[in-house]
Image: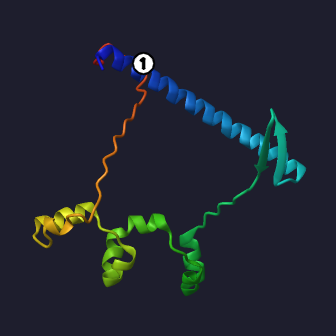
Amino acid sequence: MNTQEFVTTLARYVEVRDGINTLEAERRALAEAIGAHMAQEGRDTLSVAHGGRHYKVRRSASTRVDYDEDLLRKRLGERYLSILAVDARKVKVEAERLREWLGEHLIEVGSPDRARVKEAVEHGLVRVEEFSGAFRRETKSIVTVKDMGPLAESDPVY
């Protein structure tokens, strides 16, 4: 791909990305309008025929509740533990401390970590040969394009 083909491809990529964002926003607005209509009619499902196609439309609602954890902890004291469930976000933040707390039980909920494998090999705890045939590697290429606004004279041009 030469420079001009690259620039043309990039321009089309940005055009498609922006079109997808516009369509997604419109899709969300339309879904909201459809949901509002169904709620007004007191319907959770509708069967609709349009353009020679049959559509089954479902509406559901979910409610999110955010608790003031500090306030509840103070109010409930020891009873606070009885209302707790595992919070994946907190587990992720506290992963290193949890690793220590779990000890030998980590084998039940843990998975090999690439950085830890590398570290164990470097420190001689395990040998590279022990991993032969025990893993699959897949490399995915990720491309991101960010709109940085109007071009300034000092900006490099590809």
**Residue 152 visible in rendering:** no
In this view, 128 is above or below 6: below
Of residue 67 and residue 44, the one placed in the foreground of this image is: 44
**Is 71 displayed left or right of 117 in the figure?**
right
Q: Residue at label 1?
A: 150
In this view, 52 is above or below 73: above
Give, as a three-letter code, the residue at label 1: Pro
Which residue is most to the bottom? 78
**Is 108 displayed left or right of 28 in the figure?**
left
Residue sitting at x 58%, y 67%: 68
Tell me residue 86's x, y (percent): 51, 73
Of residue 36 and residue 12, the one placed in the foreground of this image is: 12
**Residue 71 visible in rendering:** yes
Residue sitting at x 76%, y 52%: 59
Residue 91 position by quadrant: bottom left
Residue sitting at x 14%, y 66%: 129
Of residue 150 and residue 18, the one placed in the foreground of this image is: 18
Q: What SS does tag 1 mark? A: loop
Tell me residue 127's x, y (percent): 13, 69
Residue sitting at x 34%, y 78%: 107
Task: For the C terminus, give its image quadrant.
Answer: top left
Residue 144 position by quadrant: top left
**Is 42 displayed left or right of 64 in the figure?**
right
Number of disc labels: 1
Tell me residue 16's x, y (percent): 51, 26
Task: For the N terminus, give its image quadrant.
Answer: top left
Q: Residues within 10 Å of mark 1 (few under 14, many from 20)?
A: few
Tell me residue 117's x, y (percent): 21, 65
Rendered image coloring scheme: rainbow
In this view, 64 is above or below 51: below
**Is 42 displayed left or right of 14 in the figure?**
right
